[in-house]
Image: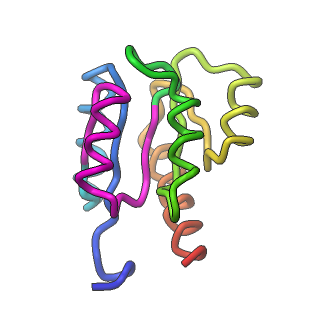
Amino acid sequence: MNQKERKSRILVVDDEANIRYTLKMILEYEGYIFYEAESGLKALEVLEEHPELDLILLDVRLPDFDGLKLLAELKKKPYPPEVIMISGHGTIEMAVEATKLGAFDFMEKPPTRDRVLLSIRNALEARRLKT
């Protein structure tokens, strides 16, 4: 099954259960395969189990990990998933740093449904064009 035929796989990494739940409802309704992690360490476990992930929605502040450092580590891997950073405490400087480290986009919490879906579609299209 090629990239176009299979459903895109998306990991949401956020320590706030309500954010994960909201994104799960949006993504599953849109037909995406949803994975979740409440910490950086759990995210690394999910990535180990599912290296075929297409996209990660990654919180900047996690209880056990700096999201920007995790982003930098992810981007060192061969053919890494696209990453969209999310934050409830974002600054322009943080968004610029995330972009420099390879983030596709940076969204403030709580993101709107339309904003999430637009960013996801654009990130997945960018990933598809890289293959």
Q: Quadrant of residue 127?
A: bottom right
Residue 65 at x, y percent in the picture: 45, 22
How many circles with numbers are drawn on the protein? 0
Q: Is residue 76 left or right of residue 48?
A: right
Residue at horizontal 61%, vertical 45%? 103
Q: Nearer the viewer, residue 34 or 47?
A: 47
Residue found at x 27% / y 85%: 1
| Residue 10, placed above or below residue 57 | below
Q: Residue at x 61, y 50 (%)?
A: 104
Question: x, y (%) of residue 58?
Answer: 46, 35
Q: How is the image coloured?
A: rainbow
In the depicted structure, whether residue 108 falls above or below residue 115? above
Q: Is residue 51 magenta?
A: yes
Q: Position of residue 23 (x, y in %)?
A: 32, 39
Residue ranking furthest to the bottom: 1
In-front residue for pair 8/50: 50
Residue extent of the magenta highlight: 35-58
The magenta stretch spans residue 14: no
| Residue 91 horizontal side relative to residue 44, left or right | right
Q: Quadrant of residue 20?
A: top left
The answer to whether 3 is drawn above or below residue 53 in the figure is below
Which quadrant of the view contains residue 94?
Answer: top right
**Residue shown at the point (33%, 21%) measured from the top left:** 15
Residue 131 pos. (x, y %): 54, 78
